[in-house]
Amino acid sequence: MKTSHIQAAVAAVFISTTAMAQGPPPGAQGGLGPRSMPASERARTFEAKSLGTTVTYVAYLPADYEAGKASYPVIYALHGMFENSAFWERRGLAPLYDDLVKSGVALNAIVVTVDGGNNLFVNSGKGKYQDLVTRDLVEHVDKNYRTIAKREGRALLGISMGGYGALNIAFSQPGVFGAVATHSAMLLTQIPTVEAGARGGQMRAFTGVFGEPVDPAVWRADDPLELAKTVDAGKVPFLYFDCGAQDRYGLFAGNEALHKILEARKIAHEFSISPGDHGYDFVKSVLAKSLGFLKSKVANP
């Protein structure tokens, strides 16, 4: 890969501006409330044993949730770098998702987002952020909401950095989620370095997780491109991923590399390169594809 492409790929995780997390109202429990409530009012906290602290999350409930007693599948949505649990609404995905549910394209599910910081949703010396998702959050949601509390009833959706985390989980913890979908996943074909163009906060994010300087062995241990080479092919969740053909950061290279690895190992998946740049305009243009895929693969009562 050319240096300019490495620089661009590393920069991919920094396309978003920082959004301040909103805490829950005093004494609030669960995530019940009308769908018109903004994320700041939906936000709740729970005790994350893996991190030893409280973490903010948002649960978007189906329109018919409060009127009935049915159990629902859950889509856990992982944000990109410099985002937080409010991203689903802040980036305009919540109303688009609701429209896709109404039109029958998307699964009528509980959508849950959680604050993961800039930690790539992996376990590291900075914190057990993979366990936050796969253990603490799932346990809390299954306990406090009417969910289909099994692998077949859970989906994982990740965007950019969240896509990296979702694929890492798909290959390292394949027994938790029945289906995984990502958009513009942050898949890098080379380890990020200052020499390759990473600067300031960029390298701080990587070195905070993978060591300073980035330890190649630690990087490879969490890299979805490496994990895909050894995961038990029979245990991989249903898998969908895509990227923009004009992705300005070159992330299509890493996504194409993953496609080739899975194809060579005959691991079933759906993959596409579609017109578009890196960002939420692209995500919105392909969201119906990922949500349609999840609807076809996730258990629904």
Image: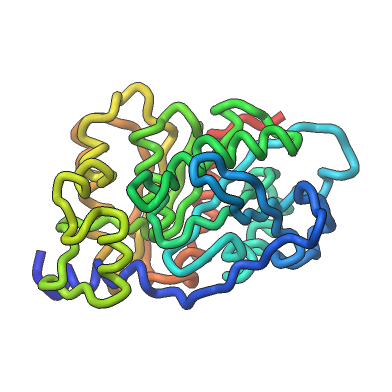
Q: Nearer the viewer, residue 260 or 149?
A: 149
Residue drawn at (21%, 49%) of the image: 219
Q: Is residue 208 left or right of residue 150?
A: left
**Is residue 40 depicted above or below 33 in this figure?**
below
Q: Quadrant of the C terminus?
A: top right
Residue drawn at (29%, 71%) of the image: 202
Q: How many marks?
A: 0
Q: Is residue 68 left or right of residue 135?
A: right
Q: Quadrant of the N terminus?
A: bottom left
Q: Is residue 277 left or right of residue 49?
A: left
For residue 262, say whether it is visible.
no
Point out the residue furthest to the right here: 67
**Residue 245 percent location from the top left of the image:** 30, 66
**Residue 168 percent location from the top left of the image:** 35, 43
Q: Indicate the quadrant where residue 153 lies.
A: top right
Residue drawn at (63%, 54%) of the image: 57
Q: Nearer the viewer, residue 81 or 170?
A: 81
**Residue 45 percent location from the top left of the image:** 67, 52
Q: Indicate the quadrant where residue 188 lies.
A: bottom left
**Residue 281 percent location from the top left of the image:** 48, 72
